[in-house]
Image (spheres, rainbow, N blue to C red):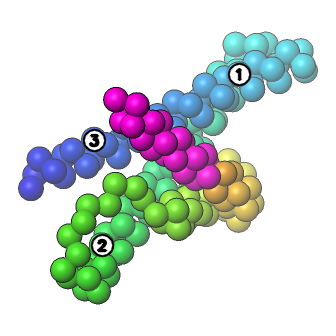
Amino acid sequence: MTSKLIDDGLAMLDHLAARVSASALTGLGCGAAYATYKGFPIPKTSLSASLSCALVSTACFSMERLAFGVITRVTEQLNNEDNSESSAIKLTTPPNVVYASHALGGCFGGGIAGFLFQGHPFAGAFLLTPLMLCAGKMELKLEEYKTERLRQLVVKD
């Protein structure tokens, strides 16, 4: 029981770290481009943008992971009450769960980031919720690609 909780926690941390790292690298590149365009010092501006992107993505994706955990626990309990004889293991996450968790992550994480950066939580939520929904769409497309590629490899052999 404890081993499964530790494994789930490490998987969640790995999921979060991958997205925050990608966001920080994106911020680094965007900061360097902005600094070049405006004539600002490149290292200072790019590191500042990278840190800001990492903080915002940490807020959003940690809230998304929290919402994902709550939604999956609730739906598991509801499915167990409705279908007690069905014991098939689901390998993919339903799209509505992914979109719901990303929307909640954008709302709550965007509210936190908006409050911390500008003092306006609704502005951050309105800005980051569509971006998080786009991230959810990309995750679903990546999962679909991985499944199709794995199917092709299995059929080929």
For the magenta stretch, what is the residue range?
Answer: 135-157
Q: Do the numbered discs 3 and 2 sit on residues whose CB atoms are within 8 Å? A: no
Predominant SS of the magenta segment? helix
Give me the C-alpha separation between circle 2 and circle 1.
41 Å
Seen as rendered, the residue at the extreme bottom is 82
Amino acid type, mark 1: Gly
Seen as rendered, the residue at the extreme right is 38
**Residue lying at 40% horizontally and 31% vertically, measured from the top left:** 156
**In what element is the residue under mark 2?**
helix
Q: Percent x, y for residue 152?
A: 45, 36
Q: State whether residue 119 appears in this view.
A: no
Camera-side residue: 151 or 67? 151
Q: State whether residue 143 appears in this view.
A: yes
Amino acid type, mark 3: Leu
Give me the C-alpha separation between circle 3 and circle 1.
29 Å
Q: Is residue 146 a member of the stretch shown in magenta?
A: yes
Closer to the chain start, of discs 3 and 2, is 3
**Residue lying at 51% horizontally and 30% vertically, measured from the top left:** 21
Amino acid type, mark 2: Glu
Closer to the chain start, of discs 2 and 1, is 1
Q: Do the numbered discs 3 and 1 sit on residues whose CB atoms are within 8 Å? A: no
Crowd rating for badge 2 (residues with CA inside 10 Å; few <14, some 14–19, many 20+): few
**In what element is the residue under mark 3?**
helix
Camera-side residue: 115 or 84? 84
Q: Quadrant where the C terminus lies?
A: top left
Q: Quadrant of residue 1?
A: bottom left
Q: Which residue is mark 2?
A: 76
Q: Which residue is mark 1?
A: 29
The circle on residue 10 is 3
**Residue lying at 26% horizontally and 61% vertically, measured from the top left:** 89
